[in-house]
Image (tube, coloured by chain):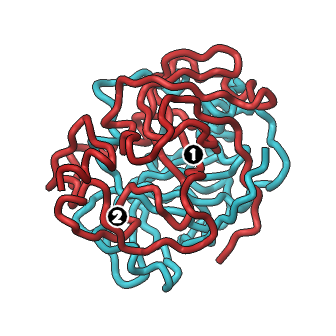
Chain colours: A red, B cyan
Amino acid sequence: MELNVPVQAIGVVRCGHRDLETTPIQAGVNRVEQAVVELEPAFAEGLDGLGGIDYAWLLTWLHEQPSGDVPPLRQVPFLLRGQRRQMGIFATRGPRRVNPIGLSLIEIIEISGTRLTFAGVDVVDGTPVIDIKPYVTRFDRPAGDPRCGWFDEVSIDERATPEWLASRS
Amino acid sequence: MELNVPVQAIGVVRCGHRDLETTPIQAGVNRVEQAVVELEPAFAEGLDGLGGIDYAWLLTWLHEQPSGDVPPLRQVPFLLRGQRRQMGIFATRGPRRVNPIGLSLIEIIEISGTRLTFAGVDVVDGTPVIDIKPYVTRFDRPAGDPRCGWFDEVSIDERATPEWLASRS
């Protein structure tokens, strides 16, 4: 059911990646590389209080994905390209989703005016940002060592991009 | 800048909460209570593979928030009602956001057909679900004990609802 709601871009990611195939699959496997969120000036005040917070959730609209149509509900995740195993999309973090919303854990490096410099890059240059939320350990860290299903069965290399994973399959 | 993109409800949350003021402020402070996502039947296949995954991110569209207008960019978070301190909205987890998207860490209890039973409830009955993503420790857990800014200065009680927090201010 389509929700008749407006989605605002609050800013845009500026980084060196142009091609999805060579962009790291998750911020969590690309913790060192830095990029910038250029916030729309109208929203700058909304960043107050982020200083002193080490990590944040970056919510993006993955605009390079086909929009409007329902993607295949089972897909081979990038990490399973070698095995050609399919998973339901809600059990994957892949970008081809019913709503192509990206969720990236970023490390906040510096905030200066409307520029938020962060480490942990998994999107291409120009990706619209739709929300930033502080990482709060009390809210966001499950107790203990939770089971992560099929993710526990794969090794996740720091070089993991779609292209790199395909080359090994 | 408004993105001209469709947002689909993939399902709806069914729970006992009707009123935001008496709904827990975060799934993370209400880990025991259970609720259900009723997925649209068309998307059921997308859940394949979630079995064996203990936690997931539930992305919701917080439909009870005023939509279309930009909310105040500084607000007093529920947790700071006592101190009446304002924060920029991107440094809060509050529901009045430019895009009212909720991000809740839920524990998956059972999946049966189109019903996903989970623990950790922080939304009202009828809230549209826009995405479900697996919690992956490798992607979603920062190393060590990150600073969480103003959240580190407040005590977060398990009874925390907006009403309860207001009664103590």
Using the rendered view, name the quadrant where residue A93 is placed: bottom left
Query: Dot 2: what SS?
Result: helix
- The residue pinned by badge 2 equals A91
| Residue positioned 40% across, 56% down in the render | A94
- Please, is residue B73 above or below residue B45 in the view? above
Q: Position of residue B50 (x, y in %)?
A: 30, 67
B19 vs A41, left or right, is left
Q: Position of residue A156 (x, y in %)?
A: 21, 44
Q: Are marks 2 and 1 on the same chain?
A: yes
| Residue positioned 55% across, 51% down in the render | A62
Q: Is residue B74 visible?
A: no
Q: Position of residue A140 (x, y in %)?
A: 41, 42
Q: Is residue A4 visible?
A: yes
Q: Position of residue A125 (x, y in %)?
A: 56, 36
Callout 1 crowding tier (Cα within 10 Å): few <14, some 14–19, many ≥20: many
Task: Look at the image and tell me in which quarter the C terminus of chain A lies.
Answer: bottom left
- The residue pinned by badge 1 equals A60
